[in-house]
Amino acid sequence: MSTTAAIIFCIIGVIILVLIIASVYFCNVAVARQTKEFMNDNPDLAVDSSAEMAMFDPEWTQHYTSGAQNSITAAPANTFETLELKTYDGLTLYGYYLAAATPTTKIAILAHGYNSRALPDMSSYAQLYHDVLGYNILLPDDRGHGASEGKYIGLGWLDRLDYQKWIQVAIQKVGPEAQVVLHGVSMGGATVLMTSGEPLPANVKGIVSDCAYTSARDILSYQCRRMYKLPTFPLVQLTSLVCKLRAGYFFGEASALKQVQKAQVPILFIHGAEDLFVPTSMIHPLYDHCASPHKEKLLIPHAGHALAFAADRQTYTQRVSQFVENFVHA
């Protein structure tokens, strides 16, 4: 072998090694259960104090969690009950159930976002359904989040199977006449859309998806360019392979866009008009490709990522209320 050929092979070897190391690193950043430092001080996730107060209500959460029990028996009045389920791959997940003030068959399952947890992060949506609309509510901690087990984040794809089970838990709690609404935000929005393409019981009456991404591959490619200023090929593809080996799925599999093409349940798509973390443009192909016979789209002006409710609580509440009332009956 000539010296030139040896040098070329060495360079290629170094490039391959760097790509492998980078792929493992970015897989950890994206889906491993660890502190997500890249989200700290990210200007695309900036939240002013007034919006933060509108998103989280620790006093409300504290009021309804005081004395919460760890069983699947009836919870005391006005407290969350901690429920659990076993996933198809043996993980134990936890969810928090709060009965409506007045007995009803209506129940909302609320799906939190990436690097988040059910409580207190979904408290404003919990208030909307429980206090305003009079629903029972169930707030799961997704795999790899909160109190639930899991070394890896499902990015909605693994979670869609978990939410099929949470739907059955909801029906078990409320009864066979349960009327279920799924409402998710950010990764939770993608989760409920991915769930929409799976076989669902007739109890599921509607889905509300707030600031969902089209697919894991699309959003990670977008963030690779935006945050790291790196070309997506071949880094995203190699990272996807590492994710498959470690977490069990390719990024391309985790596609809300493909799943909504099989959806039959009514869906309301919501997005902040100034979302730079999950770009607002992603709502349009999701809506356009959705096969549901009833679909609606709502853009909230001046709202950043996951801030549509905080930016315009009145419009958000009105549209969600009108949407669910079309399919869920008292």
Image (cartoon, helix red, strand yellow):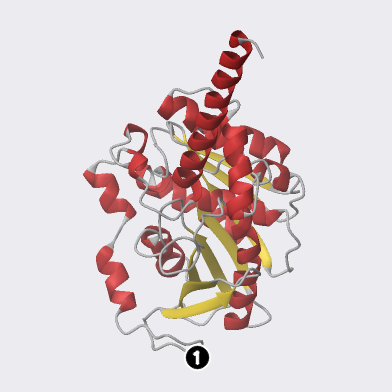
Number of numbered discs overlaid on the protein picture: 1
Q: Nearer the viewer, residue 298 or 19?
A: 19
Query: Considering the image in quadrants, where does the N terminus appear?
Result: top right
Residue under the image location 66 percent in, 44 percent down: 255
**The quadrant where residue 281 appears:** top right
Name the foreground residue: 84 vs 290. Answer: 84
Label 1 is placed on what type of residue? Thr
Q: State whether residue 196 is above or below residue 11.
A: below
The quarter in which the C terminus is drawn is: bottom right
Question: Where in the figure is residue 111, as x and y percent of width and height?
Answer: 51, 59
Residue 81 in sight from this viewpoint = yes
The answer to whether residue 327 of the structure is visible from this angle is: no
Q: Is residue 151 above or below residue 240?
A: below
Q: Of 140 and 109, which appears nearest the observer?
A: 140
Q: Secondary structure at mark 1?
A: loop
> Viewed as shown, does residue 234 lie left or right of 211?
right
Please state the horizontal and vertical placement of residue 207, each as a whole percent of the image.
61, 56
Q: Identify whether 111 is placed above or below 18.
A: below
Which residue is rendered at x = 45% and y = 48% of the image? 316
Q: Badge 1, how many Cα within 10 Å: few under 14, some, many 20+?
A: few
Relative depth, front residue between 149 and 137: 149
Q: Examine the image and state in which quarter residue 109 appears.
A: bottom right
Task: Name the residue at 28% across, 72% down.
Answer: 62
Q: Position of residue 108 (x, y in %)?
A: 54, 66
Across and down, in percent, residue 196 comes to 68, 55
Above or below, 67 against 326 in this view is: below
Residue under label 1, please give it.
Answer: 73
